[in-house]
Amino acid sequence: MQPRTRTALALLATMLLATPALADGYDTRVARVLRTTPLIDGHNDWPEPLRDRAGEQRWSIDLAAGLDRRTPRYDTDIARLRKGGVGGQFWSVYVDAALPGLEQVKQTLEQIDFVHTMVARYPKDLALARTADDVRRIHRSGRIASLIGVEGGGQIDGSLSVLRAYHDLGAGYLTLTHSRTIEWADSATDDPRHGGLTAFGEAVVGELNRLGMLVDLSHVSEDTMRDALRVTKAPVIFSHSGARAVNDHPRNVSDAVLRLVAANGGVVMVDFAPNYVSDAYRRWSAELAAEKTRLNAPPFGGLLIGQPEKAKAALQDWQAQHPAPRVTLAQVADHIVHVAHVAGVDHVGIGSDFDGVGSVLPEGLDDVSTYPALLAELMRRGWSDGDVAKLAGGNVLRVMATAERVAQSMSGTLPATGTPAGMDAGGTSAR
């Protein structure tokens, strides 16, 4: 054998042997990062499907393990949170934005109570957190810090007093809208009525600052994003949003707004929902919805109106001919990389939306056990351990700590008062 051939074969053998070691190296690095920095997910909807599917049994159902074996399966249980290295979780206390205001308040209180009860049932695994220091202390104790996010401004029913009550019960952020435009803020997925925030909406942002609650701009229109960024005194979060330059969904964040977020000191926590991740999936999903309407849209529309079984069979045929595009972990990483490129690595985080997007998730991000694979993907792309630590939780901890300092600086400010009807008809808030 020629010396050159022996050298080439030796090099090939070295490469083949090194490949598994390299993978193990990423696993080791991820584990090292998560020992010192809590992985904090900005948005998990687990309480809502537990309410919908388990009903009253949700108060006693075993949440420790095995929920992946149910039909439909849950994305979350405590065993998989542990496997995923989760150190902190914002539990969304979402309720349907179409409900009457008082019913939204009632159900929100029940959802907050459920989170408290869940934590009380599993004190060796979970602990309630309000502050950045709480999260770090709980993480050091080997437990998962449980935080609360109210996912929709409609859930305060136009009342600053209700907002303060949520804060007193442990809510750490308010998403200014959900899927519908409300009386004081425009949503990204509904027709705008205000051009962003009304005067009352600006007062809500100010009161969130005073309370030390985070202003969450996921779900809101771009005008609402800009108005909130203009008036807030504290950094904002996007608890579960992607990059609009990667997928032009209105729920995602444009480059222009990403630059404003960087100037504000905030963080965009990247979502895993296929519609927000993949442009191809978003377009396919719209075509699927259009086909459903074309086939059967009672009471007046559809080729097969009033024939649900025929319409169902026809839709299955359409889906067989038009399979859904693949959505992958790598595409989620593309959003993270883009946010970091435009806003900076100090302004990106993770906001999965697990248990809030149905049964379809990106390949490789099947449930809450899979976060380490996403962090390893960023390392493969050249991210340092320090940058991965910022993504995992360092950035949102910084935002929380800054919001706490802003609240302390406003400690002498009286609570805001007023209503949408009074303030947006030309009245003013009182302090």
Image (cartoon, rainbow, N blue to C red):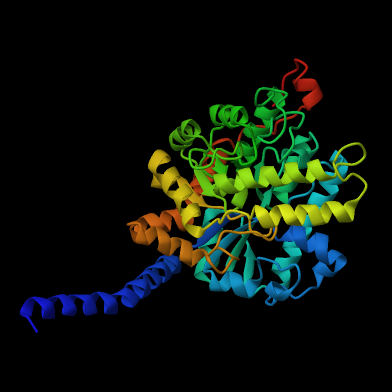
Q: Is residue 430 shown left or right of residue 421?
A: left
Kindly tell me whether residue 92 is visible in this rendering. no
Q: Residue at x 66, y 67 (%)?
A: 76
Task: State whether residue 342 is above or below residue 137.
Answer: above
Q: Is residue 10 shown left or right of residue 129?
A: left
* The furthest residue to the bottom: 1
Q: Choose between 316 and 28: the one closer to the eye.
A: 316
**In the rendered image, which quarter contains the C terminus?**
top right
Q: Residue at x 44, y 61 (%)?
A: 375
Quarter-of-image position of residue 421: top right
Residue 337 image point, x, y percent: 42, 48
Q: Choose between 242 and 142: the one closer to the eye.
A: 242
Residue 148 image point, x, y percent: 67, 54
Residue 56 image point, x, y percent: 87, 66
**In the rendered image, which quarter contains the N terminus?**
bottom left
Q: Choose between 328 and 357: the one closer to the eye.
A: 328
* The furthest residue to the left: 3
* The furthest residue to the top: 426
Q: Residue at x 87, y 37 (%)?
A: 301
Q: How many marks?
A: 0
Q: Choose between 90 and 258: the one closer to the eye.
A: 258
Residue 73 image point, x, y percent: 71, 68
Quarter-of-image position of residue 385: bottom left
